Image (cartoon, rainbow, N blue to C red):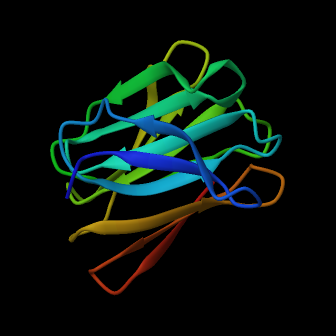
Amino acid sequence: MDKTAKVWETRMNSCLATLREHDDEVLDLTFNNNGKKLASASSDTTARVWDVTSDFRQLAMMKGHREEVSKVCFSPNGQHLLTSSLDRMSKLWSLENGCCIQTLDGHTDDVFSCAFSYNGDTIITASKDNTCTIWR
């Protein structure tokens, strides 16, 4: 793995940007609802947020997981980022200041997926412990 993520313009088949700041492989990418921000998850234990409108400048680095970050998800209102990790936890981050505002700790094995409900008031996480947990 080359530790990068590439953003492509599919109609012209051209690379718009190469994100190089992660120190290990990139595992997941997602755009926010308006497409102006991009989040990345990596084996380097971080998630990062990028500004699509300013040449993919890095806006924030979320550091706090002890193992690789497997999934990233923006909240519907665009104010938070949700991460899941092999450290058996998910974390909710403020995009305003990049700080962790809540740790969701309850699984007994790797957490490999996370999602917000449509209105953002509920979170669901999925784990290799064969459970999905709903957080309100």
Q: Nearer the viewer, residue 21 or 132?
A: 21
Quadrant assignment, res 103: top left
On the rendered image, what quadrant is the N terminus found in? bottom left
**As rendered, which of 124 and 55 lies closer to the eye?**
55
**Is residue 73 shown left or right of residue 61?**
right
Residue 79: give x, y in percent of width and height: 69, 29
Q: On screen, 113 above or below 41?
A: below
In the foreground, 3 or 91: 3
34 vs 110, left or right, is: right
Q: Quadrant of residue 50?
A: top right
Quadrant (top left, top right, bottom left, bottom right) of the C terminus: bottom right
Q: Give the camera-side residue of 13 and 84.
A: 13
Residue 69 location in percent, x, y? 31, 51
User: Where 60 falls versus 16 (above or below)?
Assistant: above
Residue at the far top in the pictured view: 97
The residue shown at (18%, 46%) is: 24
Q: Residue at x 66, y 47 (%)?
A: 31
